[in-house]
């Protein structure tokens, strides 16, 4: 039985968090494999096949495939595609593109979920900077995920960092979420907003945090495929995500190979 203090948020035992780490580590290793595979000339379907094989060969099941009818193992969102891009054998990556790869896996009934945005070949400096800002905002959000904080402290940390770096569009209407025995659970975690609101974070709660930041406007629209979300102005977008657990010692990043030690260390020491 799960211990629950708030009905909407699943609280895990220490042993259950360890089970989630197994799923998270598989996701993290899969994304590293895909990051290395990204190059001009590869198709998004090539990446999807590689991801599914790696997940299944290592004892996992893809979280995304069949989820509400989604047809693939990864979401592969290129350039102006923000999230939920469907892999295709006809979509070939080109030098100068950026691709968001979102991946989920289930191990023994527990989910891990993470995403990276990867440059394809040589990209424009403004895109390199977009990726840096978005990924760093993720780590600021994760660093705010400590026991006793409020949920929107995470949201505020993400927004505050992005706003401090220039004029970027922070996507609204999509965000992070609870995770555990299901991929998407309560609560939704926006990537913007005032601090000090929402439930108090407790040891054993697990969340996926995922800022989505656009080079231009924050405005979005969904394509006719019913999945792919794009920027309305055609400018590129970046998306990074990690799953983490609230622990007595701070956030434990379950989908990072080093559990977030390298990136969280400097942020903890500066607070």
Image (tube, helix red, strand yellow):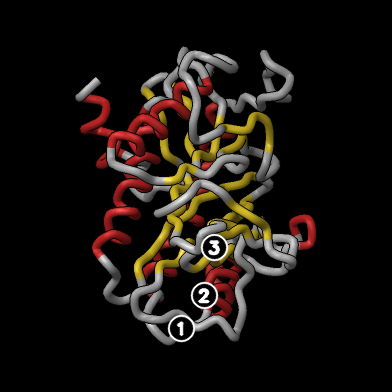
Q: Position of residue 211 (x, y in %)?
A: 47, 43
Which residue is identified by label 1?
A: 42
- Quadrant assignment for the C terminus: top left
Instruction: Give neighbour class at mark 2: few <14, some 14-19, many 20+ (Cα, 10 Å).
Output: many
Which residue is identified by label 3?
A: 81
Residue 123 left/right relative to 256: left
Q: Residue furthest front?
A: 233
* Of the pair 107 and 121, the residue shown nearer to us: 121
Q: Earlier in the sequence, mark 2 or mark 1?
A: 1
Dot 3: element: strand
Which residue is identified by label 2?
A: 47
Residue 105 left/right relative to 26: right
Residue 236 — which label? none
Between label 3 and label 2, give the one nearer the viewer.
3
- Residue 45 in view of the camera: yes
Q: Are marks 2 and 1 in contact (CB under 8 Å)?
A: yes
Dot 2: element: helix
Which residue is pictured at 39% across the width and 25% down the height? 144
Q: Earlier in the sequence, mark 3 or mark 2?
A: 2
Q: Position of residue 238 (x, y in %)?
A: 43, 55
Which residue is pictured at 42% across the width and 21% down the height? 146
Instruction: Kindly report the distance in space between the C-alpha atoms of the residues bearing marks 2 and 1.
Output: 8 Å
Instruction: Give neighbour class at mark 3: few <14, some 14-19, many 20+ (Cα, 10 Å).
Output: many
């Amino acid at each position: 039985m799960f211990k629950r203090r708030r009905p909407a948020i699943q609280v895990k035992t220490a042993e259950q968090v360890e089970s989630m780490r197994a799923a998270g580590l598989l996701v993290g290793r899969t994304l590293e494999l895909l990051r290395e595979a990204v190059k001009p000339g590869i198709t998004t379907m090539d990446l999807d096949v590689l991801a599914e094989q790696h997940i299944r060969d290592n004892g996992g099941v893809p979280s995304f495939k069949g989820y509400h009818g989604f047809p693939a193992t990864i979401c592969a969102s290129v350039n102006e595609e923000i999230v939920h891009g469907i892999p295709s054998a006809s979509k070939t990556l080109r030098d100068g593109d950026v691709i968001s790869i979102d991946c989920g896996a289930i191990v023994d009934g527990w989910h891990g979920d993470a995403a990276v945005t990867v440059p394809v070949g040589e990209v424009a400096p403004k895109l390199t900077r977009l990726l840096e800002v978005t990924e760093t905002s993720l780590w600021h959000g994760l660093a705010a995920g400590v026991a006793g904080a409020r949920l929107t402290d995470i949201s505020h940390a993400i927004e505050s960092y992005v706003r401090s770096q220039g004029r970027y569009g922070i996507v609204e209407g999509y965000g992070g979420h609870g995770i555990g025995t299901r991929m998407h659970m309560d609560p939704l975690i926006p990537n913007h907003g005032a601090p000090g609101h929402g439930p108090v974070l407790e040891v054993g709660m697990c969340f996926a945090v995922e800022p989505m930041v656009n080079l231009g406007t924050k405005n979005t629209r969904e394509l006719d495929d019913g999945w792919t979300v794009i920027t309305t102005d055609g400018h590129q977008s970046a998306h990074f995500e990690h799953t983490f657990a609230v622990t007595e010692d701070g956030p434990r990043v379950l989908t990072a190979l080093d559990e977030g030690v390298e990136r969280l260390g400097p942020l903890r020491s500066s607070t």
